[in-house]
Image (tube, rainbow, N blue to C red):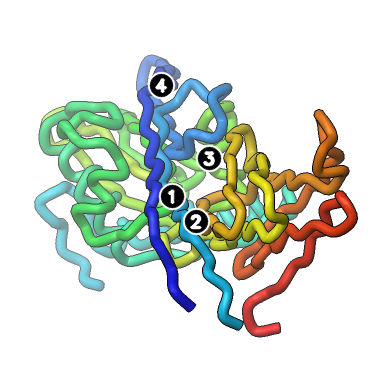
Amino acid sequence: MRLRQLTLSDSSAGTRRDWAFGLKGRLATFALLATSLACWHPARAQFAEEADSDALSEEVASNSGQSVSSDGVSQSEREKVEQGILERLNRFRKEHDLGAVKSNPKLEETALDFARFMARTDKYGHTADGNRPAERAKNHGYDYCLVLENIAYRFRSTGFSSGELAEGFHTGWVESKGHRENMLDPDVTEVGHGLARSEDSGKYYAVQLFGRPKSEQIEFSVVNRSGVELEYKLGEESFTLPPRFRRSHMVCRPRALVLPTGMTDAAKPATKSFTPEGGEQFFIESADGKFSIRTETAGS
């Protein structure tokens, strides 16, 4: 088979308002910020970034320790707090019929480094170090499809036990709409946590970094064998597909694929909706003035 290949890439990034609020008392303070790196949901007032792409080609038929580290937290305390947050997170997701997320070493490194930066400088915010969350993850070798981030700090003059820190950070995020959305995102599969304490202010900084790796992106293709140019939709985006061409899509989240099924000469042909899960090829063919859709799955 001879192929003429035209690659079309689409990478979108936008900046949205960060969530921030504080709970203050005489002896304790708590502040939170959430960011969601997934531009499909503009209703979220959060930072957004996603890595989708597509490609178009013409088909030509042929046939552990106890010492206190420099960030003010012992290894054992850090492990207890981070494990406590992870366990609470996965119980929370299970309560909402969502799968558990697993720890990823590169996300853990990214989260810990950023928590240590905030503790060292007492600068607070998703871009406090001059980088976006996705940039930090990429700099630590995480090849991302999605990245979402929650951050928070806590302070009390009398200090906290490991259990109090884990419960406090988790509950604070759950009770904030933006953070809660990140925790219940159905498409993330991995997470990393980081905890550090400022020697100057005594604040504990926590980072919760969610991800979906590029290796888990959803890949599928649409092939036009109808003999006429077609239009179809993927999510909110419209595409045209010339005869004898295929377009391959790589997306980070499931999206509705709407293909034409009616008369080829109709002004508004009937359509049929699909939700690709990965590996499908959707062949659009025509006979007697009508479209038909045939689906093949890799390995079937």
Q: What residue type is disc 1 on?
A: Ser
Q: What residue type is disc 4 on?
A: Arg
Q: What residue type is disc 3 on?
A: Asn
| Residue shown at the point (33%, 32%) measured from the top left | 153
Earlier-in-chain disc, 2 versus 3: 3
Q: CA distance from mark 4 to mark 1?
A: 22 Å
Q: CA distance from mark 2 to mark 3?
A: 22 Å
Q: Position of residue 296 (x, y in %)?
A: 71, 73
Q: Position of residue 199 (x, y in %)?
A: 13, 37
Asked whether the residues under the numbered discs 1 and 3 touch, taking CB atoms below 8 Å apart as contact, a structural biologist would say no
Q: Position of residue 191 (x, y in %)?
A: 43, 56
Asked whether the residues under the numbered discs 1 and 2 touch, taking CB atoms below 8 Å apart as contact, a structural biologist would say yes
Q: Which residue matches tag 3?
A: 182
Earlier-in-chain disc, 1 versus 2: 1
Q: What residue type is disc 2 on?
A: Met
> Which disc number belongs to residue 250?
2
Q: Nearer the viewer, residue 103 or 87?
A: 103
Q: Which residue matches tag 1?
A: 53
- Where 213 sits versus 171, above or below? below
Earlier-in-chain disc, 4 versus 2: 4
Which is in the foreground here, disc 4 or disc 3? Answer: 4
Please, what secondary structure does the residue beneath circle 1 have? Answer: strand
Earlier-in-chain disc, 4 versus 3: 4
Quarter occupied by residue 245: bottom right
| Residue shown at the point (81%, 43%) measured from the top left | 264
State how many labels appear.
4
Quarter occupied by residue 11: top left
Q: Position of residue 148 (x, y in %)?
A: 43, 42
